[in-house]
Image: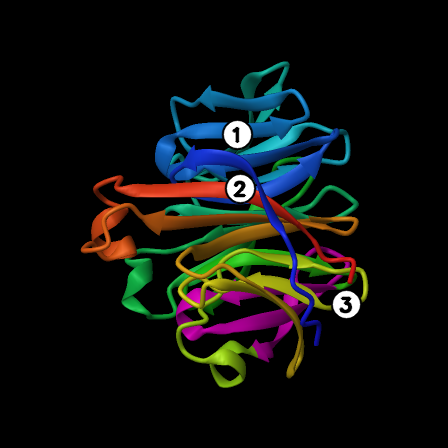
Amino acid sequence: MSTTIRTITTLCEDTIWGEAPRRHGGALWSSDTQAGQLLTVSETGVTRTALAEPTNGIWFLPDGRLAAARWHGRRIDVLEDGEPAPYADLADLVRGAVGDMSGTADGRLYLDDMGENPHSGEPVGRVLVIDPDGSARVAAEGLRFPNGIAVLGDTLVVAETHATRLTAFDIESDGTLTHPRTWVDLAGLLGENHRPDGIWPVPDGSIWVATTAGEEFVRVDGSRVLDRIRTPGEFAIACCLDGSSLYLSVSRSTDPALDLLSEALPQKKVRGRIARVDVST
């Protein structure tokens, strides 16, 4: 496991809760879901686009368009010339808010349906698959707060936050998910506070995991911890990898007396940032 001391460079401050960081076209994109804005970070600075309806998971389609899952809107839109256009109507499928989203090279999207009362800890969550024509169906169910999603070849891995594990599925030729199995038991490997949120695949088959209250990003493969980036005092939300650069989204309570999730976040007394760290060594 790497123990190299690294410099974490802040790229964007004054966020609330940056979800789904994605690199595209030389820029970093992220949904600041709680602030109702879409962030774009490039060499020219930070652009904040206010949204009438907040987005959560985002993903770039093979044709370069940005697909954006409306957090409570039960649909996916695409942004064309900066304007939203309908892509997939999920009103008959989604039972709660939608979460993270990932995709495959052939244009399929996979999206979390958190389900009703997702924080109950019960297996009410599902993963939906959306075909390139916009049709959608349930791909997997019985998940305990599905969160980050990563595609590793013909395997899909989903972070089950309230189960403190990563769960893997085989991706069949029609996009169906089969043969569920535990890919990493994070509770057993790192402890109960390392509940996974955003995840990102690495070309070698491992996965970077944002560990929320674990206050670190870890690269794991089965029962092995291969690398870790600690963020003491900051809740680890999401990440993405572009070459040797790992992009991180973290947040903290601005009032130490308030619990981050149950008190500070509802009151918007949270300050977040998006940062970059070199993980080439």
Q: Earlier in the sequence, mark 2 or mark 1?
A: 1
Q: Are marks 2 and 1 in contact (CB under 8 Å)?
A: yes
x, y percent for residue 20 = 55, 44
Q: Residue at x 43, y 74 (%)?
A: 163
Crowd band around label 2 with a 10 angstrom C-alpha radius: few (<14), some (14–19), many (20+) = many
Crowd band around label 1 with a 10 angstrom C-alpha radius: few (<14), some (14–19), many (20+) = many
Which of discs 2 and 3 lies nearer the camera? The answer is 2
Cα–Cα gap, marks 2 and 3: 25 Å
x, y percent for residue 254 = 28, 45
* Residue under numbered circle 3: 205
* Residue under numbered circle 1: 39
Is residue 37 a member of the stretch shown in magenta?
no
Res 96 seen here: no
- Taking 49 as reference, is 22 left or right? right
Magenta span of residues: 155-184
Q: Earlier in the sequence, mark 1 or mark 3?
A: 1
Q: Are marks 1 and 3 in contact (CB under 8 Å)?
A: no
x, y percent for residue 146 = 47, 61
Cα–Cα gap, marks 2 and 1: 10 Å
Q: Amino acid at mark 3?
A: Gly
* Residue under numbered circle 2: 274
